[in-house]
């Protein structure tokens, strides 16, 4: 019998999200609703779609065509002024002085004890100007607090920017049609500026999928719907559709999610971000001495294939056990993979169980299941 995604996830029967001024709509919300969004979640106090047609259909379409994603919830904290670079460097062990003018940097942001506060993408907008594209965590006051405490000459505020992602294997073709082949040829984690409706717009080769694509950083609300409509009209024969980040595809690719796989309990070395800790050249980072002492973690992220029926979306922290019942860690994200035919998962494993390929067990909502551990993701 062919296994499918768990049918118990019925968005029509779950309680609605009650409207509140504390949860912001986006400039693209009307288009999401026209395309039949059936589930939202809240990210940085803003709506982000989670399901359109179904988890499986959205996933399959992402892998075969091209989607427009409303990721306005990726809020941009703008740092501008003579001390903008210094403020950035206080918060991260990555050497920010090496950024090229057209570059995007994925960085671990840590507190003074080396614990993960965020894992944003930083976009260099000028010699003294940066956008910090934050994950789901209130960071504005943290940057402001450091700026005040260190008496830095820098302005810190949330920029009026609304990212729209174009993701999928046909993303290059769609973007080329509207903005030319030169934009499509931009290297990964680099950006260009394009002109749309008389205004400049940053377009980065990036996005929260393994399928390839771009993120358009739209300044101001006026251009949001026109940009969506222009891209949609140009991609009719490419099967363009509204979409959203897919947890299935994210886990297959091994992309970690802040708040799920990465939390304030973790150090960069525990969550596989040690390569971004350039401790020889980032000594101004507040956590430098703490991070030097954390380079040999006693627990680390691993990937898992879990046997059994398709697992439902749930609150995670499912216990991982060794064959003799000893606690070995926990699962932080999991999903049935239609392409691989088993449950894929991400979890934190403690010593002495960090041996790849060993059989372990996971206590899932459907009962205890055998699992196999691996060091790398699937795609």
Image: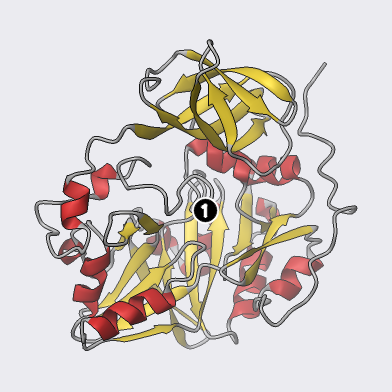
13 above or below 27?
above
Q: Quadrant of residue 101?
A: bottom left
**Residue placed farthest to the right in the image?**
13
User: Which residue position is annotated with label 1?
Assistant: 259
Residue drawn at x 85%, y 46% is: 10
Quadrant of the image containing the N terminus: top right
Along the horizontal axis of the image, is 149 left or right of 18? Answer: left
Q: Quadrant of residue 31?
A: bottom right
Judge whether residue 106 can be spotted in this image: no
Q: In front here: 348 or 63? A: 348
Residue 305: horizontal and vertical position, in percent? 56, 23
Residue 247: horizontal and vertical position, in percent? 61, 44
**Residue placed farthest to the left in the image?**
280
Q: In front here: 57 or 66? A: 57
Q: In front here: 40 or 369? A: 369
294 above or below 147?
above
Residue drawn at x 36%, y 25% is: 351
Q: Quadrant of residue 63?
A: top right
Q: In front here: 131 or 126? A: 131
Residue drawn at x 37%, y 74% is: 142
Could you classify mark 1 by the number of other residues whose Cα lies within 10 Å: few (under 14), some (14-19), or many (20 or more)?
A: some
Residue drawn at x 43%, y 71% is: 139
- Colour setup of the view: secondary structure
Along the horizontal axis of the image, is 220 left or right of 5? Answer: left
Residue 171: horizontal and vertical position, in percent? 54, 54
28 above or below 117?
below
* Count of residue discs: 1
Judge whether residue 155 can be spotted in this image: yes
Helix, strand or loop for disc 1: loop
């Amino acid at each position: 019998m062919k296994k499918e995604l768990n049918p118990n996830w019925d968005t029509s029967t779950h309680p609605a999200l009650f409207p509140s001024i504390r949860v912001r709509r986006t400039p693209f919300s009307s288009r999401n609703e026209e395309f039949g969004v059936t589930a939202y979640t809240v990210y940085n106090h803003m709506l982000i779609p989670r399901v359109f047609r179904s988890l499986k259909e959205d996933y399959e379409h992402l892998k075969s065509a091209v989607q427009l994603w409303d990721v306005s919830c990726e809020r941009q904290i703008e740092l501008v002024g003579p001390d903008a670079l210094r403020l950035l460097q206080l918060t991260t062990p990555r050497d920010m002085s090496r950024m090229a003018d057209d570059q995007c940097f994925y960085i671990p942001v840590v507190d003074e004890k080396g614990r993960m506060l965020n894992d944003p993408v930083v976009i260099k907008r000028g010699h003294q100007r940066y956008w910090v594209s934050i994950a789901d965590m209130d960071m504005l006051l943290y940057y402001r607090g450091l700026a005040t405490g260190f008496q830095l000459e820098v302005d810190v505020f949330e920029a009026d920017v609304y990212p729209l992602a174009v993701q999928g294997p046909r993303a290059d073709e769609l973007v080329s049609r509207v903005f030319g082949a030169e934009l499509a040829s931009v290297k990964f984690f680099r950006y260009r500026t394009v002109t749309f409706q008389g205004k400049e717009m940053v377009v980065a080769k990036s996005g929260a999928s393994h399928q390839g694509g771009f993120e358009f950083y739209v300044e101001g609300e006026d251009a949001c719907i026109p940009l969506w409509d222009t891209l949609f009209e140009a991609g009719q024969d490419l099967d363009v559709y509204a979409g959203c980040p897919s947890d299935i595809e994210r886990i297959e690719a091994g992309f970690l999610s802040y708040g799920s796989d990465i939390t304030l309990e973790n150090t960069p070395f525990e969550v596989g971000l040690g390569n971004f800790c350039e401790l020889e050249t980032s000594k101004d980072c507040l956590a430098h001495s703490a991070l030097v002492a954390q380079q040999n973690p006693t627990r680390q992220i691993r990937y898992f294939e879990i046997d059994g029926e398709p697992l439902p979306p749930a609150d995670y922290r499912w216990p991982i056990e060794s064959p003799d019942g000893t606690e070995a860690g926990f699962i932080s994200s999991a999903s049935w993979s239609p392409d691989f035919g088993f449950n894929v998962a991400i979890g934190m494993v403690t010593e002495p169980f960090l041996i790849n390929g060993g059989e372990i067990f996971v206590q899932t909502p459907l009962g205890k299941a055998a699992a196999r551990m691996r060091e790398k993701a699937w795609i």
